[in-house]
Image (tube, helix red, strand yellow):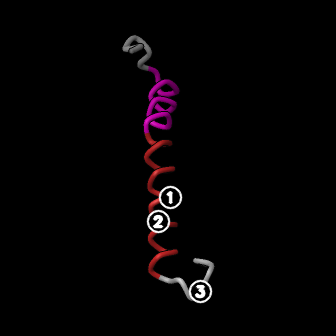
Amino acid sequence: MMMGCCTTTGMVFGLLGMLTPLIAIGAVIYLLATKSNNPEYGEAC
């Protein structure tokens, strides 16, 4: 853990690095939920 890097850029990249997997997992869960809830539409637009 690079705790010495406390610049704004370091914090922004750190937050992006932590949030990117959560965003990806959330997007997959959202797509699966919309696909299972609306099978007749085909596309969640």
Q: Amino acid at mark 1?
A: Ala
Q: CA distance from mark 3 to mark 2?
A: 15 Å
Q: Secondary structure at mark 1?
A: helix
Q: Residue furthest bottom?
A: 40
- From the image, tell me which residue sits under label 3: 41
Q: Which residues are magenta?
A: 7-18
Q: Amino acid at mark 2?
A: Tyr
Magenta stretch contains residue 10: yes
- From the image, tell me which residue sits under label 2: 30
Q: Quadrant of the N terminus?
A: top left
Sooner in the amino-acid sequence: mark 3 or mark 2: 2
Q: Are marks 2 and 1 in contact (CB under 8 Å)?
A: yes
Q: Looking at the picture, how far across and down is residue 8, in whole percent?
A: 47, 27
5 is higher (above) or lower (below) than 9? above
- From the image, tell me which residue sits under label 1: 27
Q: Are marks 3 and 2 in contact (CB under 8 Å)?
A: no
Q: Amino acid at mark 3?
A: Tyr
Q: Secondary structure at mark 3?
A: loop
Please name the residue shown 62% across and 81% down the image: 42
Magenta stretch contains residue 8: yes
Q: Looking at the picture, how far across and down is residue 12, in whole percent?
A: 49, 33
Q: Looking at the picture, how far across and down is residue 36, in whole percent?
A: 47, 76
Please name the residue shown 62% across and 78% down the image: 43
